Amino acid sequence: MNHSNASQAGFAQRELATFIHGLPFAAIPENFRTRLKQSVLDSIGCGLHGAGTPWAAMVAAHATTQGSGPCRLWSHPGVRVGSSAAVLANATMIHSFELDDIHSGSRSHPGGVTLPVALALAESGRVVPGRALIEALAVGYETLVRVGACQGVSSFNRGWHPTGTAGVFAAAATASRVLGLDPERCVHALGVAGTMPCGLMAAQYGAMVKRLYAGHAAAAGLLGASLAQSGFTGVTDIFEADYGGYPKAVSDEINLAALTEGLAIRFDAASIGYKLFSCVGTNHTALQAIADLMRTNAIGADAVESVEITTSQYQVLHSGWDYVPGTVMAAQMNLQYCTAVLLLEGDVFVDQFRDALLADPAVLALASRVKVITDPVQDHKDRTARVTLLLRGGRRLEGRCAAARGHALNPPEWSDLERKFLALAGDRLSEGVCAELVDMTRRLEDIDDVNSLLRLLDTATA
């Protein structure tokens, strides 16, 4: 794209709007299409599991007070609510247990802020073929990771949650595409939604509200696009404005070029990753390194005297704090806890966050012997973790992981994500329905109407 007008107010917003409106299916690289289809399956699985969590149940109950409508609440058979309420609840379900897809470069979770938006609109009187769903997700995902790159790590270090902030733009982009907004109205959809970012990282230490950030962002983006469709106007230079512009409001170091450089040619969102551990993404490299050492050396917690993990300042800030028993949220965000339960139970998935384990004396004793150290020269984009296990008797085992299984640099197979989906959804859907959902997501571009996929969710148990 032409960058000769890059200094002109509103340039990036108009370029993004043109991209959102006009990206053809054929321009989406095949590997990106595959990732998006995998993300549909992964997000549905995360949402079905998340529906059973107390925090998601509370948000779903709130959604039912907002009146009836055409849209499903996942895992709530027979319940129908309005599109905004459904988006708030279903997105919260997806983001409810540290399981949703992740883009490491932008520190964001695209599935929760895009898929519920597109599906709610598909339930609201319009036919959305599978190809159109892929297109809408593509522009939503790409918008998110580019805004995330624009605001950079500074935003996170200041205490903002990137999915809750940049996510409003992703949701607006997805909704704009499904609604068929022209570029001018797309500009305003971004300009309305972009005034409503949310999400403070203080919530990572235990509050339920962290689970809400994807839901709020998704609902804000839908609101922005819906208002823009009717002619409502938003900020038209939301990225470039010096006073009150989005990037400068949330970040000390911004990169406007990241918004449009190579747009529609290079798809940064194709480097999406998936969580095979049920915890914050910054923990995964250390956990993978430890799991590999356990498997290779046939050891468990009884053999380990202490653990030392060295990684970037970013990862230490996010999860390297001393573990204090509290909530599931705090445990999922904490590397000491996750290391201890991996050594004790051999996994870090949903069962490792049961209430009885959060303050278990064996977990606390082992967690206290996990030391997390900052490497002062390691770049924040480098997720590498170096691990040393000191065994009883004095033997030392050393391991290193730069990309855990599921990460874009160590990508999963369909079989990995199918196993994860079955583990999350198998207690809510029959084996046959699970198989149908897997099949439909694999061939999503051939489906005439994504409501046929949604109807399978009607069999889900509460």
Image: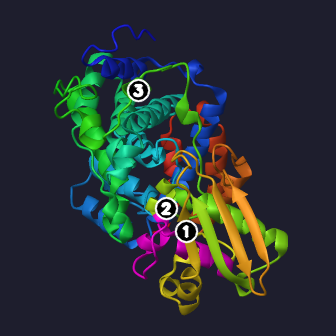
Q: CA distance from mark 3 to mark 1?
A: 34 Å
First along the sequence among labels 3 and 1: 3
Is any part of residue 82 visible from this angle? no
First along the sequence among labels 2 and 3: 3
Would residue 286 be counted in the magenta stretch? Answer: no
Identify the secondary structure beneath mark 3.
helix
Mark 3 or mark 1, whichever is nearer to me = 1
First along the sequence among labels 2 and 1: 2
Residue type at tag 2:
Val
The residue labelled by disc 1 is 372
The residue labelled by disc 2 is 316
The residue labelled by disc 3 is 259
x%, y% of residue 161? Answer: 36, 52
Residue type at tag 1:
Val
| In this rendering, position of residue 122 left or right of residue 262 | left
Question: 97 or 331: which is nearer to us?
Answer: 331
For residue 244, above or below residue 419 = above
| In this rendering, position of residue 320 left or right of residue 445 | left
Is the stretch drawn in magenta largely helix, strand or loop? Answer: helix
Residue type at tag 3:
Leu
Give the extent of the magenta segment: 319-345
Question: 270 or 457: which is nearer to us?
Answer: 270
x%, y% of residue 409? Answer: 67, 43
Would residue 332 be counted in the magenta stretch? Answer: yes
- CB under 8 Å between callouts 2 and 1? yes
For residue 449, above or below residue 262 = below
Q: Is the residue marked by circle 2 packed among few (<14), some (14-19), or many (20+) residues within 10 Å?
A: many
